[in-house]
Amino acid sequence: MVKHDTLPSNTAILRWRDAFLALNQERLDATRSQMTKRQQAVIDVLAVLLHVNHPRLPGFVTADTPCGVRGFTPSIAQRSALHTLARGVQLPRDPAHRSIHALYLMGSLGSVAQSSSSDLDVWVCHDELLRPQHLAALRQKCDLIEQWAAQQNCEVHFFLMNLTEFRQGQSRSADGEDCGSTQHLLLLDEFYRSALWLAGACPRWWAIPLSEETRADSYWQRLVDNHIVSVDQWLDVGSIATIPAAEFVGAGLWQLNKGLANPYKSLLKLLLTRHYASQYPRIRPLCWDLKEQVQNGGANFKNCDAYRLMLGRIQQQLQQEGNAQRVELVRRAFYYKADLPLTELNKGQRDGWRAQELLALTSEWGWDQNQLIALDQRQHWSPQTVSRERNALVSEMLSSYRYLAIFSQRYASRIHIQPRDLKVLGNRLTAAFETRPGKIIQINPGIRSELEQEKITLNLKNSHWQLYPGPWRPNDNQAPLRQSESLVELLAFARYNGLLHDYTQIALYPQHNSLTQYELRELLGVMKQLPSPKLNNSALTTEAYPLALHIFVNAGVDPQHQLSRRGMQKISNRDDSLGYSSTRENLVHTADVLSINSWGEWQVSRYEGHSAIADILAQMLTHRELARQQGWPEWYVHCHCVSRAIAIRERVTELLTDVTTHFSQPQPSPYLLQIGADYHLLEIRQRKLHIEHAESPQALLTLLARPRKRYQTWQLDRHALPDSPLRLILEESRSGIWQVYYWRDKDYIFVYVCDERGALFFQQWPESDLRQWLIPLLRFMYRLDQRWQYSQNRVQARPIKLAELKLKPLSYEFECERRRMPDDVQLPAAIDLHAVIDNQRHMTFYCNGQEFRQSMHGDQLFSNVANHVRELRHNAAAYDCRLTDLILADNEQLVAHLTVRQRLEKRLSESLISTPI
C-alpha cells in the first residue's frame, strides 16, 4: 500500500494502468470467445464507427456529426474488421475535434454470467460542452449503429454520458434502461468492477491507491501538480469513498422493478445492496476488492470476475446468518443468470471456460447431476413449481427491500430519488406484488418463457372451483394451482398467466354440474379476447382507475334450478329477471366483476345472493366522480347460464345503463331499485354513495319516511314497485306542497302523506266512515301549517292536495283521482286536544284548555287525558282519540309530527279502552 504522505512514481502509476489494461484485455478476449463471428465483428468495429464519419459506414448522419475518440488510433484488428465491413473504405484523417472522451462496455460481459442473450451496453462519454443540436446528431449516429448491429444479431444500446452531470448524481428518469435518479455511487461501484474499456482515456480511479480513496480529488491534484500523471490520458468518472445511506431505498425500488422481468439478476443485485447497508457506515464496495487485486498484482479475469465477487460477498453473509434455503436460492439465481444449462451442453461448450467455472462452482456447492437436471428442466417446470419459485424470489426481494426501507428511515435524512420516479416505481411494485382477495397475480416473472397448457382440469368441490394444470383425476394427490368460489377468477388467472391457448382442452369434474360445455366455451371465448396486461409509465404517475369492467352473471349457476324442482319456472306473465314470475324470484344469483385498471391490475370481485346486483352498482358508482371527468369505464355484461341467459344479460345491461346515466347528473336524486322481494335505495350524500336495504314493504316505508333536508324527486327503476301504489305516489311527488293519498282495499284504508320535501308518511285505518279518519288528519295538517306559516314568514298557506288511489281496470297499475277538500276541515274540532313535547322530551297535553303535565301525572298521564276526553264526549263510546295539534321543540317536519301524532293517538286510544268507565 502507498502511504498517503508519499506519492507514487510515474512508473508505479503506469504499472497500475498496465495491470488494469491487461485485465481489461483478458476480459475482452473472454467476451469475444462467447460471441459469434458476426458479433465479434461488431465489437471490433464499434470504436472505429464512433471515431469517424463516412457515408459508407453504419452510423453516418453528416460529415459534421460529433465523433472522434480521445487518444484513439485503430489497431490492425480493428482496421481488418472495418475492411471486412466496408471493403475499400479509407479512414479519413483524424477529426479536428475529438468529441468523445472514452467508450466503455457495461454489464456481465467477460464474466461467468455472460450469456448468449447478453447485450452490449455502451457508455459514450462525450464532451460536456456539446450543444443540444450536436448531441441530437450524436444520438442519431448511435441509433443508426444500433440498427446495423441488430442486423448482425447483436443487441447494442448506447448511453450518452455527460460525466460532469454523472459525478453530480444527475441521471435520467426511471422510464429508460438506466437507473434513473435512484443510485449514483452504487452504479459507479458497478462500473468500476465490471466495465470494459474500449477506447479513449482510462478512468483516473485506477491511478489512485486504495488507501487514498476517501481523498481522491486532493490526491489527484497532487499527482497533477507534481507532473506524475498526464491529464489527457485519464478521465474523471468519479470517486467512491463510500456509498451514502440515501441511495439504498431507491436502489431497492429499482432492482425490485427490474425483477418483474428478470428476477434472478435483480435478486443478486438487491442482496448486494442489502449487504452494503448491513456494513454501514464502514461500507467496503466490491470495486475496492478489485482495485486491491489489480494494484497488488496477480489479477486475472477469473479471480476478478464481477459476478463471482458479488456472489462471494452475498453467500458469505447469508451463510453467517445461517439460512440454507436463502443460500440455495441465491445459488440458483447465479446459475440461471449464467444461462448455461450444464446438462445440455455439447462437448465444445463443456470445454469452454464458462462451463468449467460453473461446473467447479456447482461441485463446490454440492449439487449432483439429478439436481442439475431438475434445474435445467426449468422451461418444463409445472406451473405449481413456477409459482413456488416465484413466491420464494418475491419473498426474498421484498424482505430485502423492507430491510433497506427501514435502514433508510433510520440513517437517511433524504433519499436520492426524484419524486416522480419514487411514485412510478412504487406504484409499479404495488401493481405487481400487492396481494388482496380476488387479485390476479403474475406467477411467472421470467422464470419460464411461457406456461401454455395443452390441458387444464376444473374441479368443483365443496362449492369451490379448483384449477389443475394438465390431466387430473379425483383420486390424485396433486394440489391445485389455485382455488376459489369464483369460476371467473380461475379462468382470469389462467388467461392472465398465459395458461390458455387456442388448443387448450378443459376437463370438468364432476361431469354433471351446472357448468355446461357450452357455457365454458363462451366464458373461455370472452377471456381469450381480453387484451394482455400492459403497463404504461405515464399511468403510474396517477392513482389507478378502472379501464374496463367485465360482469359475469351466474357463471356456472342455473338460476332456475330451485324453481324447476318446485315446478314453478313460470306461473305468471312477469318477465323481469330481477323479479321473475309471481313469486318475484331474483334470477341473478351470483356476479363476478373482473376489473382491469390503468396499472394493468386484474381484480375479480364476487357477489352472491339477493344483494349481488346492488353490490355491482356500488362498485360501479364508486367511480362516479372519475366518470364525470373522463366518462365511465367500459363495461360489459356476460351471461351464458343454462336458463334465460339472454333475458338476464339484457336486464342487467338495461339496469346498469339506467343507473350510470342517472348518476352522471351533477345532483342525482335517490334511486329506488326492487330486486326480488327486497328494495335498495341508492343515494349520494356528501359526495358519497349510500345504499340502504329494505327487506319488506314495511321496511321500505320506514326508509321513505326519513326527514329530508331538501326536495328531491324519486327516481324509480323502470321495474320497481309494479303493483304498488307507492310507484304512482313517488312519481307524483312535488316540491313545496303536501299531498294526501288514500286507497280503499278490502277492510282497510291506506293513507299516504308526502311532505314538501318528498318524505313519505304511511298509516293504515280500518275500513269505516272515511270522514271519521280523514277530516281529523287534514284538520291537524291545516293547524300545523297555520302555525308554521308565521314562523317561516310565508305569505300564503301551503297547498294540500287530496286524491284517491284506484286500480286501473284489468291492470296492476294505479291511477289517482283528485278529491275536493271537505268543508269540515276548516271547522274547529269538538274537542281541542293538542300536545307539546319540549327539548327534554317532557310531554304536556291540553284538552279544551285543561293542562296535563307529565311531571304532575307521571305514569297516569295518558289514562287521565283519556278519561277527560271521555267526560267531554256526548256519549261514552270508546272511539279513538284525535290530536288536533302537536308542537315538537325545534322541529317543523310534517312526517315527524304525523309519526309522533300516530304514536300518541294509539296510546291515548289504548288507555281509553283499558280505563273503566
Image: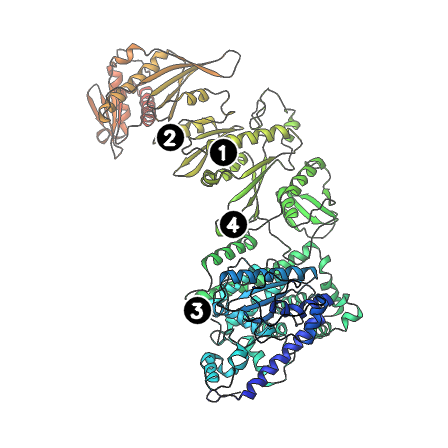
Residue 390, relative to residue 205: is it above or below?
A: above
Which is nearer the eye, 875 or 227? Answer: 227
Query: Sequence order check: which comes first, mark 1 or mark 2?
Result: 1
- Percent across and percent down for residue 238 are 50, 74
Quarter location, residue 893: top left
Q: Amino acid at mark 1?
A: Thr
- Which quadrant would the C terminus be assigned to in this image? top left
Q: What scheme was used to colour the molecule?
A: rainbow
Residue 711: give its label.
none
Distance between the alpha carbons at the discs numbered 4 and 3? 32 Å
Quarter location, residue 890: top left
Q: Which residue is mark 2?
A: 706
- Callout 4 crowding tier (Cα within 10 Å): few <14, some 14–19, many ≥20: some
Can residue 371 be seen by looking at this rendering?
no
Give the number of marks. Answer: 4
Q: Which residue is mark 1?
A: 660
Query: Sequence order check: which comes first, mark 2 or mark 4?
Result: 4
Q: Amino acid at mark 2?
A: Arg
Q: Which residue is mark 3?
A: 411
Q: Amino acid at mark 3?
A: Tyr
Query: Sequence order check: which comes first, mark 2 or mark 3?
Result: 3
Query: Sequence order check: which comes first, mark 1 or mark 4?
Result: 4
Residue 787, relative to residue 181: is it above or below?
A: above
Q: Are marks 1 and 2 in contact (CB under 8 Å)?
A: no
Distance between the alpha carbons at the discs numbered 1 and 3? 51 Å
Quarter location, residue 300: bottom right
Q: Which residue is mark 4?
A: 539
Q: Amino acid at mark 4?
A: Ala
Query: Sequence order check: which comes first, mark 1 or mark 3?
Result: 3
Residue at image coords 61%, 20%: 571
